[in-house]
């Protein structure tokens, strides 16, 4: 009897260590989904205005392509980090390098910070910015994650006190792929060792014309998507300390996208209809899908005005209503986007976008993702 009791004790102990308590009930710890981690290292010296503009305009199409990715039957998470380097306004002691954003899945925050970047002359130290990103960012230890650095610039890759090969060796030890994007002539990038950096880092060497005028194809579906996006914004219910400011920032990033081109606003709307656009930290609809919420404990003064005098039950009913409404709108946007993509594919001439940031990054990501069993 003692032996059986000991066996039972150890089995129960093992179950407890591999489970977590949620809402007073014992439940299995969820398996962490794969994550695509992308660190963008952007040269913000004087000549790089075109690069920054392409990054602003094409962020949403890159995210949209990633939203179609699958790994083991599910969509992986996406986290993006952002660095600027080569800007004389930055500290020389830090190598003219600044971490703009730690890894985040907050796509509005990424957009906001891209729009905040300004260019100014400086020295571009590629090896040092790669090394800095390896040391400062939380790359995690999940071997199933796809971890990539994309460094873009137009000066020799060899500048600075940190040897690029030493930095890239550290990246390879952490299972991080280093991709290089030279802004200029292919052969000039080769002589500047940008191709060598990519080959050493197990990544792709790409060239873009950073000053190329981006041609956006207008489709018959764009206006309907823009209208649906406005309806979509009305399904968000801010809460918490920063909820109101985050809600305002969502609308601001819509305007930023539209300021570039209506087609960019359309692509952002498509992103907002995907499963990569989540805002559980400030939106009650997304938050309630991730966890059980006690609506009676939410601070009323941090809610939208129309909910501040409502009971907990009334707030929950309102959240449920907005969740259903959002799902329907997102589905309509996705359906229209399928037609939009087909229309664009017909109109788009072959290779018209081969030397733009969006196309080279998507091509590299898909190629490298296959090695981790990601598919599209």
Image: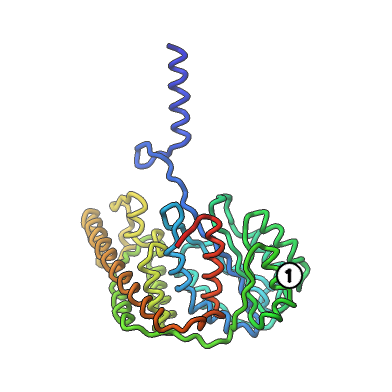
Locate residue 137, reporting x and y percent. 60, 59
Q: Residue at x 34, y 73 (%)?
A: 337
Locate residue 28, reporting x and y percent. 40, 39
Coloring basis for residues: rainbow
Q: Is residue 286 left or right of residue 90?
A: left
Residue, far bottom: 213
Which one is nearer the viewer's eye here, 156 or 362? 362
Q: Residue at x 38, y 62 (%)?
A: 275
78 vs 193: above or below: above
Q: Residue at x 47, y 14 (%)?
A: 3
The answer to whether any part of residue 259 appears in the image is: no
Q: Residue at x 77, y 66 (%)?
A: 163
230 vs 162: above or below: below
Residue that badge 1 annotates: 93
User: Image quarter for residue 167?
Assistant: bottom right
User: Image quarter for residue 1?
Assistant: top left
Q: Secondary structure at mark 1?
A: loop
Which one is nearer the viewer's eye here, 167 or 177? 177
The answer to whether any part of residue 157 appears in the image is: yes
Q: Residues within 10 Å of mark 1 (few under 14, many from 20)?
A: few
Locate residue 83, reporting x and y percent. 60, 69
User: Image quarter for residue 272?
Assistant: bottom left
Q: Is residue 148 left or right of residue 341?
A: right
Which one is nearer the viewer's eye here, 244 or 75? 75
128 vs 53: above or below: above
12 vs 305: above or below: above
Residue, far right: 161
Q: Which image quadrant: the C terminus? A: bottom left
Which one is nearer the viewer's eye here, 162 or 95? 162
């Amino acid at each position: 009897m003692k032996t059986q009791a000991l066996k039972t004790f150890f089995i129960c102990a093992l179950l407890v260590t591999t489970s977590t308590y949620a809402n007073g009930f014992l439940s299995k710890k969820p398996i962490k989904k794969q994550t695509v981690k992308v660190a963008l290292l952007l040269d913000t010296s004087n000549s790089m205005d075109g690069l920054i503009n392409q990054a602003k305009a094409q962020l949403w199409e890159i995210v949209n392509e990633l939203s179609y990715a699958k790994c083991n039957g599910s969509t992986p998470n996406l986290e993006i980090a952002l660095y600027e380097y080569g800007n004389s306004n930055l500290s020389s002691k830090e190598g003219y390098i600044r971490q703009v954003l730690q890894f985040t899945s907050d796509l509005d925050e990424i957009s906001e910070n891209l729009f905040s970047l300004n260019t100014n002359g400086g020295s571009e130290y590629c090896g040092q910015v790669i090394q800095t990103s390896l040391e400062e960012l939380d790359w995690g230890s999940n071997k199933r994650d796809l971890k990539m650095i994309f460094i873009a610039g137009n000066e020799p890759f060899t500048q600075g006190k940190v040897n690029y090969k030493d930095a890239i060796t550290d990246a390879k030890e952490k299972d991080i792929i280093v991709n290089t994007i030279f802004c200029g002539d292919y052969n000039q990038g080769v002589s500047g060792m940008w191709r060598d950096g990519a080959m050493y880092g197990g990544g792709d060497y790409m060239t873009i014309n950073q000053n190329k005028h981006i041609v956006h194809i207008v489709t018959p579906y764009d206006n309907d998507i823009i209208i649906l996006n406005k309806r979509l914004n009305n399904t968000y219910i801010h809460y918490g300390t920063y909820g109101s400011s985050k809600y305002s920032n969502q609308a601001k990033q819509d305007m930023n996208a539209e300021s570039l081109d209506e087609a960019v606003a359309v692509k952002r709307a498509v992103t907002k209809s995907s499963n990569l656009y989540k805002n559980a930290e400030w939106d009650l609809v997304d938050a309630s899908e991730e966890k059980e919420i006690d609506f009676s404990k939410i601070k009323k003064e941090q809610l939208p005005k129309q909910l501040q005098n409502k009971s907990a039950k009334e707030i929950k009913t309102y959240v449920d209503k907005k969740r259903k409404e959002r799902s329907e709108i997102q589905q309509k946007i996705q359906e229209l986007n399928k037609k939009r993509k087909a229309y664009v594919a017909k109109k788009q001439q072959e290779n018209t976008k081969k030397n733009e940031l969006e196309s080279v990054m998507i091509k590299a990501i898909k190629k490298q993702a296959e090695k981790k069993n990601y598919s599209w």
